[in-house]
Image: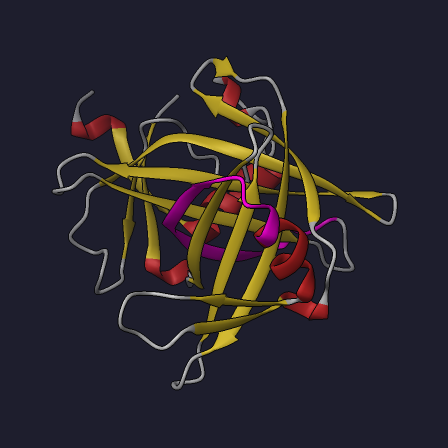
Amino acid sequence: MSTSERKYITIAQALKDWWYKDAKTPAELKTLNPLQIKIGDEITIENPDLQNFKFKVALFDVYTRVIDGKEYSFVDYQLHDDVSEPETWVTFRVIPVEGEDPNIPPKLSMLLLFPHRQEEYDETLHKKFLPSGVLKIFEDGKEPEVYERCAGLRKPYVAVVTEYMGKEVADPEEITYWDFQRTLPDGQIQYYFVELDSAKMFKTYHARQVSSNDVNILSTEV
């Protein structure tokens, strides 16, 4: 596709387009997709650690959970850079936060998630450490990172996750996950997520917030 058929759009413009216009094809634009991102779109992130990467959207996952009888959903855009050595994967999580007026677009809370570990099922982690509300992450030769559950929760969230990859839509999968946070010396909040999938595999991620001003989308026309 030629450069003339691609355009950069800001997060604010993407949200406005999604809110005020009818969803278009392909399939990934027909579900919850507040940024109207399509598979293959390029994402640039103005962050010292990531600004030299050339990320493309490889797929995305829609998480839906029920809290007090109401559904809440958010989107994980899976970003891939196959040029870097080794190849780099980053998850761009976008969470719509509804306001009091249902006629205006929601605000967006956005996080960057960085893969940390993938491990076999650990009963001690599942039954003892995660329910305690405090999680210590040990790295070789370093002081442990101490995280506490967000909002003082103890129970995990359970979400139904649907993966979209172009025209292909995977069968929904139930995921159990825990969210933790800690305050860094500079006052910033660092997050840590633990997921337990239906295959009884643990996946963990470090995460931090990102501003909408730091993200741009190079979108292909439908």
Residues 218 and 193: in front is 193
Residue that protrudes farthest toward the front in the picture: 124
Q: Quadrant of residue 138?
A: bottom left
Q: Is residue 111 left or right of residue 162?
A: left
Please tell me whether residue 100 belongs to the stretch shown in magenta: no
Residues 99 and 3: in front is 99
Residue at 49% x, 64% y is 191
Residue at 49% x, 24% y is 164
In this rendering, the count of numbered labels is: 0
Q: Quadrant of residue 97?
A: bottom right
143 relative to 96, above or below: below
Residue 2 pos. (x, y %): 17, 23
Residues 32 and 120: in front is 120
Residue 66 pos. (x, y %): 78, 42
Which span is picked out in magenta? 103-124
10 relative to 39, above or below: below
Regarding residue 108, the answer to whether it shows in the image is yes
Q: Quadrant of the N terminus?
A: top left
Regarding residue 25, the answer to whether it shows in the image is no
146 relative to 53, above or below: below
Q: Is residue 122 left or right of residue 111?
A: right
Q: Quadrant of the C terminus?
A: top left
